[in-house]
Amino acid sequence: MRGRYPEHHDAAQFYHIELMELKEQHTQQVGRGRPGKTTKYKTHYTVIYSLSWARRKKVLQQELNTDGIFPLLTTDSEFSAKKTLVAYKYQPRLEKRFQQLKSVHEGAPLLFKKIERIEAIMFLFFLALILQAVIERQVRLKMKTDKIDAIPIYPEDRPASHPTTTKIFDRFYDVSTYRLMEAGIGVKSFKDALTTLQKELLELLEISEEDYWHFPDQKGQPR
């Protein structure tokens, strides 16, 4: 029943609440027989409780005037009021970035026994989110500089005005290199030809084709 009380919902200040106690009196004859001059009586009292309440109009009006208003606090003393508000409004976009932890990066519950191991893997996920944001920032700024409205990276070559890292990487998922080996030594290498869109993406990322193909493999050799 506690949830029904105004204090539980922080609403006590808005009401005048009074619990009144009333005593109801009645007498009862002591002993049996007909009442007479010597008959004694005993008085009984029954307590009756009554609850009365009324709204505090002045307090409600004051609350109405401040409804929906809340303070924004920052530890940066150089932040102006406007800059603080802009930073606050950026929060949903920041939360959307961390939402990709489960969607894009497929973050799952961890069964590590030590908190240090959980912190380590979450730190790697955090670095992945940072790199993802840097890649998107680089591509979008270069598009703005080169006055490119959109690039066709969505399925069916549909254009995207704000390319995401996931879609950019998807365009390179089927690019492969091949190496002929003889006695453990590479004798000849082949690579797929890049499409026009892939070349455009590398240009937006300011990565040359030579640097792209020169990325070393696990043995330290160019792929």
Image (cartoon, grey):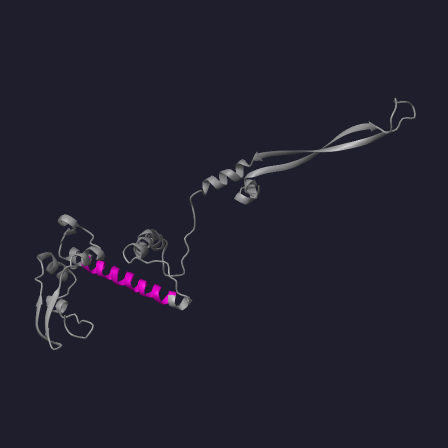
| Quarter of the view holding residue 73 | bottom left
Picture residue at 78% right of the left edge, 28% below the top? 26
Position of residue 168 measured from the top left corner of the image (x, y, whole percent): 18, 57
The N terminus: image quadrant = top right
Say if residue 123 shows up in the picture: yes
Left or right of 74, for residue 214? left
Position of residue 54 measured from the top left corner of the image (x, y, whole percent): 58, 34
Q: Nearer the viewer, residue 66 or 120?
A: 120
The vertical placement of 51 against 32, above or below, is below
Left or right of 130, for residue 177? left
Residue 136: say if magenta. yes
Q: Nearer the viewer, residue 94 or 78?
A: 94
Position of residue 152 measured from the top left corner of the image (x, y, whole percent): 14, 51
Residue 91: say if magenta. no
The C terminus: image quadrant = bottom left
Highlighted range, magenta: 118-139
Picture residue at 46% right of the left edge, 39% below the top? 64
Position of residue 104 measured from the top left corner of the image (x, y, whole percent): 27, 56
Most common SS among magenta residues: helix
